[in-house]
Amino acid sequence: MNKFNSIDILLVEDNPQDAELIMRTLKKNHIANEIFIVYDGEEALDFLYSRNQYTDQNNHIPKVIFLDIKLPKVNGLEILKIVKADENLRHIPVVMLTSSVEDPDIKKAYEYGANSYVVKPVDFDSFCSTINSLDMYWLVVNQSPKK
Amino acid sequence: MLQLKIDSIREILDSIHDALFIVEKKSKKIVYVNRLMCKMFNCSIKHALTCNISNICSDIKPYTDKEFNRKLSKTTKEGKQVFEWIVRNPKGKVFWVEIVLNNITIDNNKYIIAFIRDISDRKNSEKEKQNSLALLQAIFDSSLDAIGIVDNQGKFINGNKTLLARWDKKTKHLIGQSANKILPEPIFIERLKYTQNVIKTKKAVRFTDHYNNQWFEVSISPVLELDGSVNKVAMFSRNITEQKELSDKIGVERDHIVDVLESMSDAFISLDKNWCFVYMNAKAGHIFKRDPKKIIGKNIWEEFPEAIGMPFRKYYEKVMKTKIPINIEEYNPLDDQWLENTITPTRIGISVFFHDISARKKVEMALLKSEERYRSFVQCSGEGICLFEFEKPISLKLSLKEQVKALYKYGYVGACNDKFAEMYGFSKGDELVGKKLAEFHGSDNNPENIAALTNVAASNYRIVNEVTDEIDKNGNKMYVSNNIFGIIEDGYLKRVWASQNDVTEQKRITKTLEESEKKYRLLIESATDSIVILKDGLVQYVNHVLIELSGYTEEELIGKSFIDFVAVEEREKVLAYHKKRMEGEIKPIRYETYAHKKNGEKVPFEIVSSVYTYKEEKANLVFMRDISERKRAEEEIRKSRLLLRTMIDSLNLWLAVVDLEGNYLIANQYYTKTFNLSLNLIENHKFEEHFEPELFKKHKAFKDQCLIEEKTINVYYELEFEKGKIINVFGNYTPLRDNNGKIFGISIALMDITKQKEIERQILVLNQTLEDRVEKRTTQLENANKELEAFAYSVSHDLRAPLRAISGFTKILYEDYFEKFDEEGKRLGNIILNETIRMGQLIDDLLQFSRLGRTAMHLSLVNMKQMAQQIFEETKKQYPDKEVHFVLADLLPVKVDIGLIRQVWINLLSNAFKFSAKKEKIEINISCIQNKNEIIYSIQDNGAGFDMKYIDKLFGVFQRLHNPKDFQGTGVGLAIVQRIIARHDGRIWAESEIKKGTTFYFLIPKHIQL
């Protein structure tokens, strides 16, 4: 039994508080089943490519990736670039979930092929509703290609 | 009695001249017609028998069949009827008939027999008679003569209108009246006698009588009856009073004329167009030796065949033809008579008056003879002699003008010799004889001629040796010496003797002399200079110019010594010149001197003196020209020259003018000092002389260029002027043109601008340093900006995260441990949450604020009104339950950064709403005004307002003038607005009153300099 087989969301977030808040919100709504968190960019890649600490897994392709921009080691935009360049991974919807409202970042993100760019609101209620909307959209409404 | 059978009866009936038919009384049918009836009505017997009355009657009333039936009835009652009728035959022809109806009984049946006779002809002739009667009546009445039909008693049977008018009686009254009643007794008796005579003799008579001062021509004609008897007459009476009077008059005049003609001393005949004598008076009878009475009607040429060849016949015929009267003289050899014939045309032919002039003629003849003698005498004379005679003597009482007129009109050459005639271009004296003055002497319109003759008349026709100018035959001018001798008798000029001598040649010579003298005089008089003629130093003649100029009179000058008028200091010089002149110096000497006017004033003169012959002696002709003006002008020039000199010498630059050869014309002091030249003798130098070869080369190049291009050349060069010292020279070479535009020289102006050059250099260096500094600063600024950018980024990103965590976890805490919190706990939790939100806002605002300084501005024309409206509506959405009164005036569009200005409106409107929200009604008023260069927008609210004491803090960052308890806010909004406005080169300010409201004004220039 492979516990990584049915990952719904891959959450790449370095801020543990933010991570915790997101998890809580998602769990509350029971939409997503399996959420996997990595706390830095390198780990995210390791996970996606089933290498290093994740070699013992089969290729696990999440249904959607929630990606922050500011990450240690490899930053979000770089990961996005790699994912979207990779034949096997490029089909995965990537949602930039980030605090940065900087225009250059937004531009770059879309250039690299982000499916969506969402700014994390400061106010928690808004934050929650944003997360839930995302969850609802990408996992329920949106049609992903079947592997 | 003959017994007639039916056939015979029919025959008889058929042969009678009338148409016949029989009508049965009872049936009214036609039972019998005769042949003529059939013929008249153009029908057969058979047909006729089928007809009844209506077939023959016409529709013409009253000749209808109804009436006819009535006639039939009348016949039955009264018996035979005879009447005229109009009938119609079957063809439609309508004609007059006479019908006789009668009752007849045949075999005990009652019939009516009708006889019809066609009376068309009768009717026509009746009509004609009527017409001709009417015509006769018209003629009768319209006659202008009074016509009366009178019987042998003198009674009127009839009369025409004229008669009636004359007697003003109506016909009724006239007829039966005796003419006695109308005519005076004697006239009546007379006329009655005539009347009765005419009746008896049956012959008409004509006579005239008169009564009541009227004359009548009466004619009485017999009126023949049919049987040839006469028992009345027609008397025609015509009023001939006017004609009578006229012919009486003519008769009287005629007698009068005859008396005159008979009593005349002249003979008189009158001929008609056919040359027949109409009249001859007794005297003529004597001349012609005929009986006047018997000659009337006889043709003159037939009567006097010998006259046919005579000269007068030609004249008679001429007058007859041309109707122009002629006078001729004619000699009658039979009686040794001279007769003057005056032949005049008349209405019917010609008439001739004969006047005996034999006596006169005899005298004339005698005169003629003696004249011959004198003629030959005159002819031999060497002078031109002419006898001027007059058609009629001229009265000396007449005005001169009249006399001259008469001379022209009546005067003619009675006699003249060949010499005289030659003078007028004729060859023989005879050619002139008879000619009038105007024909040889000159036109009578010529004022000269008139003047000459007037002169003659004025001198009483006695002229001795006077010279006049005349025109000869060829129209050439000639001069004549005249002697005139007029014969005057009893105040009348009878004739004039004139002798003339041609003095043309002498005159010509004198004239030439005079003319040349005139020419010289004219020359002298028209000179604008003063002219003096001196003889032995004394003034002989002065012209008017000198007289006027000097102020002396001619008398004061003539004969005086000229030296007296010369200025004292000049006298020696003048005398010296004069001496030279008189000693034979050929060339005219010209010099200047001064002379005195009468008033002592000294006048400068230019003198030219020459020697010539004046009136056969040696004299001085002196021309004196007043040169005061010139002297003045010279002084002016000298003055301005001095000024110019002073000016150019004061300049601190080298100024020189050279001619095309390089000779100096002008050089200023600066120049001469520099090159060590003598100012006075500058003309002696050429600018090549003192130049270094280097300098000279430069100069020559510039000079040549200037001359070639023919315009000003600006020059600049560096020069090693003194050892080691380099100067910068700047200036120009300008070509100078004379009045014809030709270049005669060059003006050279040069300046030492070394100092200025140095300064220039320094400025350049300074500029360069400045440039470098600016560049450095810019780089620094750019770096600073970059740092700020990074900082802002950081802030935006990194600060938010913890903020989110705080907010999030507090919320979780709230939710999960809700029950465990008391009121205070909840309150505290709320505070934390609110603060996080606020912090988030602050961060956003700060970020925006910082970004403001960095982003580039993109200007475009913005519809401010539209934007304000839009933003108002968006902001209002946040206050759905508030009553808002919004006034938005027409805002002028302006060129601004659309994004930034949007932020301004957002912030200002948001404030307006926020601070007015506590009032019952929010009132916001937006308007704008403009002046030349800027637009000022204003937004007014009725909010809480602020204390103007703190106006300086209004736009400070994070500065608040209100308690956050009352009004929320970060205190960055207005700071942002101010920064944006400042970036637009504008200004923002506000006015407020606490509790009343606030008005914000922001000014934006129309043209922003970024």
Image: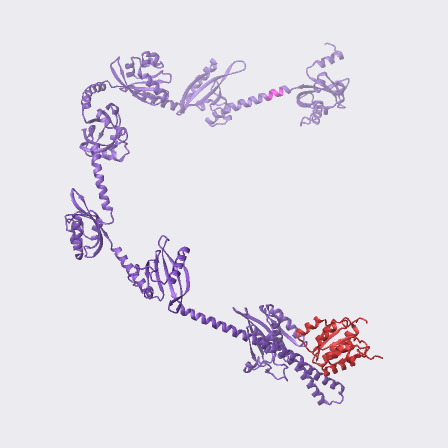
The magenta span reads B122-127
Looking at the image, residue B924 lies above or below residue B671? below
**In this image, B96 relative to B477: left or right?**
right
| Closer-to-camera residue (B634/B668) | B668
The total of numbered circles placed on residues is: 0
Image quarter of the N terminus of chain B: top right
**Colour purple maps to chain:** B
**In this image, B394 relative to B276: left or right?**
left
**Colour red maps to chain:** A
- The structure residue drawn at horizontal position 33% and vertical position 17%, both measured from the top left corner, is B314
**Residue B597 on the magenta span:** no
| Residue A107 rendering spot, x and y as whole percentages | 68, 72
Q: In the rendered image, is residue B311 in sight?
A: yes
Main secondary-structure element of the magenta-colored stretch: helix
| Closer-to-camera residue (B652/B13) | B652
| Residue B1001 rendering spot, x and y as whole percentages | 56, 75
